[in-house]
Image: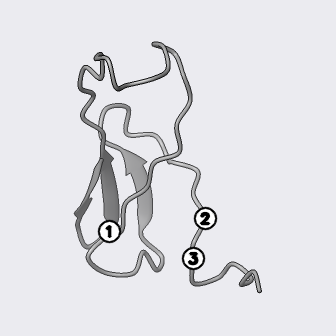
Amino acid sequence: MHAQDATDRVTLVLKRRDAAGPEVGGEDGGVARIGTVPHHPLGTRALVDAVTGEPVPHTDAHTQPRAD
């Protein structure tokens, strides 16, 4: 996944690849946590899905309480 920065939004692009192989576990339809960091803080910009154009739920590491 990578983030494409623009002045009014950050668009997330996820490229799926075949992960089949003897050293890869899991099956199609599994769930994985993925992440990326935009080049600049999100601020008030929208975070959108590149395919659907819909907003993407997210957390902001700068506003979340730190775990000690």
- Provide residue 50's location: percent of width, then percent of height: 30, 41
Q: Secondary structure at mark 3?
A: loop
Residue 60 is drawn in which quadrant? Answer: bottom right
Residue type (three-letter) at the residue carrying disc 2: Thr
Question: In the rendered structure, which disc, 2 or 1, sits on the residue that comes first in sequence?
Answer: 1
Q: Nearer the viewer, mark 1 or mark 3?
A: 3
Marks 2 & 3, CB-CB < 8 Å contact: yes
Residue 61 screen position, x and y as percent = 57, 76
- Marker disc for residue 61: 3
Label tally: 3
Q: Quadrant of residue 40?
A: bottom left
Q: Secondary structure at mark 2?
A: loop
Q: Residue at x 34, y 25 (%)?
A: 23
**Model colouring:** one colour
Disc 1 residue type (three-letter): Asp
Mark 1, residue position: 8
Would residue 53 be found to the left or right of residue 21 on screen?
right
- Using a 10 Å C-alpha cutoff, classify the residue at mark 3 as few (fewer than 14 neighbours), some (14 to 19) or many (20 or more): few
What mark, if any, has residue 59 been given in the picture?
Answer: 2
Do the residues bearing badges 1 and 3 touch, measured as CB atoms within 8 Å?
A: no
